[in-house]
Image: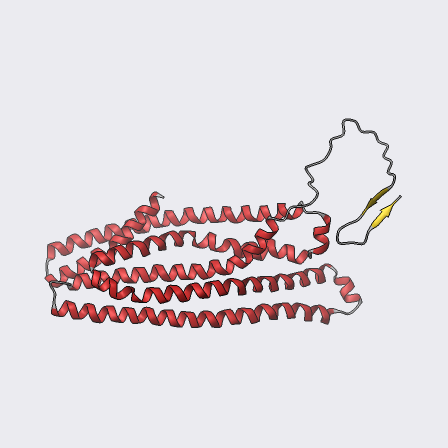
Amino acid sequence: TVCLAISSAATLALPKYQGAVVQSVVDKDRGQFEMDIRIFVGLSVLTGVFGAIRNTCFRIVGRKIGIRVRNQIFSSIIKQDIAFFDCTSTGQLTARMTSDAGAMVSPIRTMLNSLITSCISVVGGLVMCFYTSWKLSILAFTSIGPIIYLTGMYASWSKVVNREIWTALGDANAVATEAICNIRTVRAFSTEHLERSKYQASTSRALNKGMKDAIVGGGTYLTTNGLDLGAGALILWYGGTVAMQQPDQLSVGELVTFQLYWAMINSGYKTLNSMLNNFTRAAGAAQRVVSLLDCLPEIDTNDGKKLSEFTDSIEMKNIGFHYQMRCAVSRN
């Protein structure tokens, strides 16, 4: 927490002193220029050192979360009833322990650090933009609303599509696992082409869904990026006009500072947008994993009656039993 606070504060202060350096050059103030350069270098060192420590800590936490999730998935699978294994293929279960679990924890492991940092950059950048020039801020934020709306619509749609992709890949993994485990039977009946066609049908479904997601994502990126670039051009045009005609209201250094803070907001927002898309894709895999973790067996292996005495003679009479997914079996 301390490293995150120091690194974020130093990052937020850097654009202010970058603008101050430019203004010192414009004013030809040597003393102020050297002092601003020293402060800028010190802030850069703080950002690098504490940012590295912060990044290391978040990566360690992410890896621990990943290992814990995989252990919980295996523990949940191994305690299920036999009927559960009758109706669920081995390939589906191994897919959830490997690819689904990996997709679920990957954003946590790689982006937990970026999420907090980007949120601080966006909020801090907004405050500093208004502090630097409230007129430019109001002008720049006209593009934020449409971008957020389009991104939210795409994220909701992409979540459903990516769940279908993970399901199709799980089906393909199930076909491959069953074919490889029973390769002698497959070879004996010469059904290699049948297994291959079943596997390709599942991967083709995943590919078609992925292509649809890629096309819609590209259109969303084109629209939001166009709005962003348009806002940037508008800021430079209006800010440059004011700086040339009314330098007492907006100096060159303040314009540079505002542009740097606006770039910081854009960078943080794009990172959050990318993470939102990754979390949306991971949500499809997470639903498959969570449904497995929430599945409880009907027979509790830790429950039962303890026998006070036990002899080596066991006799069974009038016993009837059946598995849920199989035909009834009875013995007398």
**Closer to the camera, 164 or 62?**
164
Q: Quadrant of residue 115?
A: bottom left
Residue in the image at 85% along x and 34% along y: 314
Which quadrant of the figure has residue 189? bottom right
- Residue 165, above or below 115: below
- Locate the C terminus by quadrant: top right
176 and 133: which one is in front?
133
Looking at the rendered structure, the number of numbered marks drawn on it comes to 0
Residue 238: % across, % down: 20, 70
* Side (left or right) of 174 relative to 24: right
The residue most toward the right is: 332
Quarter of image, res 234: bottom left
Q: Could you say where residue 263 lies in the image, as x and y percent from the top left?
A: 29, 62
The structure's colour scheme is secondary structure
Side (left or right) of 205 relative to 319: left
In this rendering, would 30 be left or right of 171?
Answer: left
The image position of residue 215, as x and y in percent, is 48, 73
Q: Residue at x 35, y 50 (%)?
A: 51
Instruction: Please tell me which residue is depicted at 24% across the width and 56% down the height of the picture.
Output: 128
**216 or 1, which lies in front?**
216
The extreme top residue here reads 308
Query: Which residue occupies 44% across, 59% down?
Result: 276
The N terminus sits in image quarter: top left
